[in-house]
Image (cartoon, helix red, strand yellow):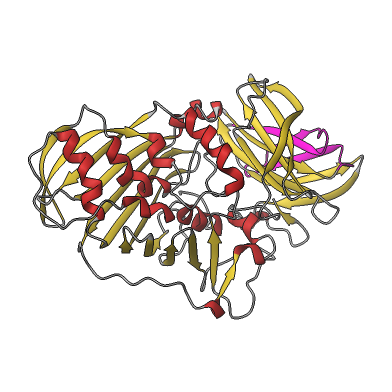
Amino acid sequence: MEGRRWSPRMAATLVLGIAPLTACGGGGGGSHAAAPAAGPRLVQLAGARTGRARGATMFLSVEASGTPNGSGRVDGFGAVDLPGGRADLTFDLSGLAPDAPRRLPVRVIGAKSYLDFTGQPLPSGITLPAGKTWVSVDSTSAPTLDTLTPFGDVTTHPARAMQALRGVGASVHSIGAEKIRGVATTRYRGDVALVDIVRPAPGTMPAAQQATIRTQLAKLEGTRVPADVWVDADGRARRVQVTITAADFTPVDPSAAGDHTIVTTTMEFSDFGRRVNIVPPPVDTTVSVNDVPHLGDALGVNGSGANATPTGPWTTVQSGSTSGVDWVLLEAAASDGTSVCIGLDVGTRVPSGQPGDFDCLDRNTADDPITVYGSNVTGSRTYVFGGTVPEADRLTITSKTGARVDTVPHGGTFVAFLTGDDQVAHIEAFSGSRSLGTCVDTTDTTTAESSASVC
């Protein structure tokens, strides 16, 4: 987005939602002209009929506006095996940041996604093993992969769009005739259930997190979002467009209510019936994200403890109100016995079970004294929270604009609020006047410090 620098985390954001393309599949049967049907029924059938085509070419665009970093756009295209759960796509990320790559290959096979980092920068201090260029991410073993957040993963939206058509509302109406890549279609407008878009596809949900995700999904029941679908003469969807706002996720996280982010995702399909053969990249060039120290953290797909998830009850560590914003910081034990889970609820001082924003990461040590667990915009403030070493009695947070905020940690956790949509540049921990260490945001190279860890 405008003013941002390229970060591998952006690539991960793309990949996380692509795997559920399998949800596009429908029942058997060949292609045939659609029987006369009312708008809602015709749109409901479009997802299944599109899936029957098996292979197709897909064009994808995701456009965000109203975000703290301005507007941004991602484009992609490639081959998809709709019922087989496979995709071979190439993304153009230059609409996210001036130095972002124009060509990032991604392959998706069921629950596994593969990113080709050939020639792509990695965060400071992180390198891939010799000869490795592909990084694999398995959604069933990356606990934060499918956790619902107010922003969501933008490519989760198109991945769910086809299955969501089955629950289109009764208010569907025809907009008129339009051509999509030279093919005559009829455009229909209606709304679909948000829960159908963000629900993880079968086989892609970490087993340890199933109960948590089901609870979050239940909170979204009843929320509907606008959708347009362009249906051809064979009853197949040639284009699907869904618009989601961050505020749609308010039932999951109250802080989303003041977020003005709007994400519009558009998928187009052509070449129905094309032969598609998508295979994993060569084993000798592939490394798991879990086998590269700190890479999962940098990509935002898992913690250092790759399989850690919350176990036991969440307990309140601290709570308060900052500039009129109520908050409560919570902690829970992690399933691996060594990590710790820290979460923040914004807009309340009373915990409601699972916090809206949380992660499970390794406990802080002298070598890694500060860890940012989450940062987001709520109303007129940007919050940042995380963990630190127990001996820290003060943290100084410096923003990208040079503003400084001091905060007192409690129980190895901290929370602070910045003005407006300012972003963290670096954080320093102190014990009295002695510095315990610094972490930096490597998405801005002007703040890079060789002796500091990555926030």
Residue at image point 63% right, 29% down: 345
> Where 115 sits versus 382, above or below?
below
Q: Is residue 388 left or right of residue 38?
A: right
Q: Can residue 43 be seen?
A: yes
Res. 273 image quadrant: bottom left
> Toward the viewer: 303 or 335?
335
How many numbered tags mark residues here? 0
Q: Nearer the viewer, residue 27 or 367?
A: 27
For the point 37% across and 49% down, which residue is it? 159
Instruction: Indicate the position of residue 397 as horizontal and vertical percent values.
Output: 73, 40
Residue 51 magenta: no
For residue 73, side relative to residue 148 (left or right): left
Examine the structure image and report whether residue 411 is included in the region drawn in magenta: yes
| Percent coordinates x, y for residue 254 in the rendering | 54, 26
The stretch in magenta equals 390-419
Return the x and y of residue 209 as percentages of the image width and height: 59, 43
Q: Is residue 301 left or right of residue 313?
A: left
Residue plotted at (12% across, 33% down): 38
Question: In the image, is residue 133 above or below residue 350?
Answer: below
- Which of 54/453 is in front? 54
Percent x, y of residue 22? 37, 54
Closest to the observer, 64 or 170: 170
At x 54% / y 61%, what residue is drawn? Answer: 137
Above or below for 8 versus 164: below
* Relative side of 260 to 396, left or right: left
- Asked if residue 426 shows in the view, the reply is no
